[in-house]
Image: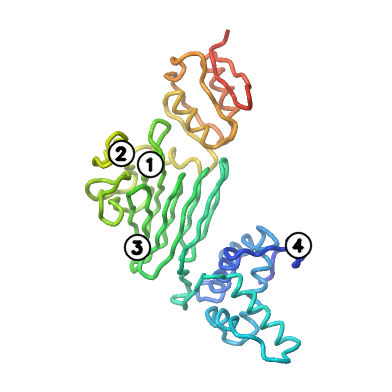
Amino acid sequence: MNAPDGVGGDESTVKVTPEIAAEASVWIARLHGPDRSVEMERECLSWQARSAAHRLAFERCTDVWEAVPGVRLADAYASAASRAPAGSVGANADLVGTRRWLLSAMGLVLILGVSGGAFFMLGSGETFGTRVGEQQNVLLDDGSRMVLNTNTQVHVKMGTQERSIRVDKGEALFEVAKDSRRPFVVRAAGSEVVAVGTVFSVRLGAGAAQPEDAVAVTLVEGRVTVRPAGGLLSAGAAPAQPISMQAGDQVRLVKAQDRPYDVTTAHLDKPDVERLVAWKRGEVVFDDVSLSEAVGEMNRYSKTRLVLRDDAILSTLRVSGLYRTGDSSGFAQAVAALHGLKVREHEGRLELGRAQ
């Protein structure tokens, strides 16, 4: 499969990180496995198109794979550890150099064997993150997908017994590939969500008025269990007992701030799930929420802060409607027109106040 056109870059100046090298090696393994498809090829081309570093990593991994008949990825990394014999020249020397590059690029990342065409990445894991206003789609090596919302950080570690995700901040949606041998476990603030094959989201800081370690789990498809991480209560937001969720459920876990080791309050309800995951489409949907809550939600997606001024009564005004994430100005103008307010730009922020 050829690399995409238009992805240029002088190899001497292109920086291939260990993370990109690891992703390239997984793509090579998947494309040479029994589950190769046209859709997989398109996804790989899209991955290569991200940068010259992605393209170069894919080309170098391909060189190693094709240089030796029947080579496995683990063989390629093992071969990279060997030194070239004295006097090696030409193609052999180039191959040894390429293998040596692979080993140094991969660092401590190990890829062990093939089972059903899927490689399982072990070791210290990998961290993914977004900044304010960004989103990121991540294809994991087991076929699961993560969609990271604004200002989010997660840590991924794929093991032989468990697929482990830790949400350090923000919000992420998980589309879990079925693997009955390895549960998919997402941990956040003392709680863990256990799934096999399902779709759900996890958010830290479950609302504008909630503490930062509050957790909201929203189940889109399938079933999951929410329980204390490791089966133990902690200072984080963990339920006293495991909670079984069905599609359409949301569990919000809020820890009492004045007594950190008290049992967390768990709220189970059935909200409008499509509204809660509208951020995947770049939208925020409000249904009769307070203006202060709406402002808090819009501020998640923009570095231009919205501020309510002049009167505490403003925070109790109600807001409904669909808005674009990151469009703080459009939101402020719409709310101002609805409630007869005035928008003022001041010191890099947008202030909403009563018209004089």
User: Which residue is under mark 3?
Assistant: 183
| CA neighbours of label 4 inside 10 A, class few (<14), some (14 to 19), many (20+) | some
Residues at circles 2 and 1 in contact by the CB criterion of under 8 Å: yes
Residue 303, x across and y down, in percent: 59, 35
Name the residue tied to disc 2: 255
Q: Colour scheme in the image? A: rainbow
Q: Amino acid at mark 3?
A: Pro
- Sequence-first tag of 1 and 4: 4
* Label 2 vs 3, first from the N-terminus: 3
Nearer-N-terminus badge (3/1): 3
Tell me how far mark 4 sits from mark 2, CA to CA.
Answer: 51 Å
* Foreground: disc 3 or disc 1: 1
Badge 4 is on which residue? Answer: 9
**Nearest the eye: 124 or 46:** 124
| Disc nearer the start of the sequence (4/2) | 4
For label 3, the crowd category at 10 Å Cα-Cα, with few meaning under 14, some 14 to 19 and many 20 or more, is: some
Count of all numbered marks drawn on residues in the image: 4
Q: Quadrant of the N terminus?
A: bottom right
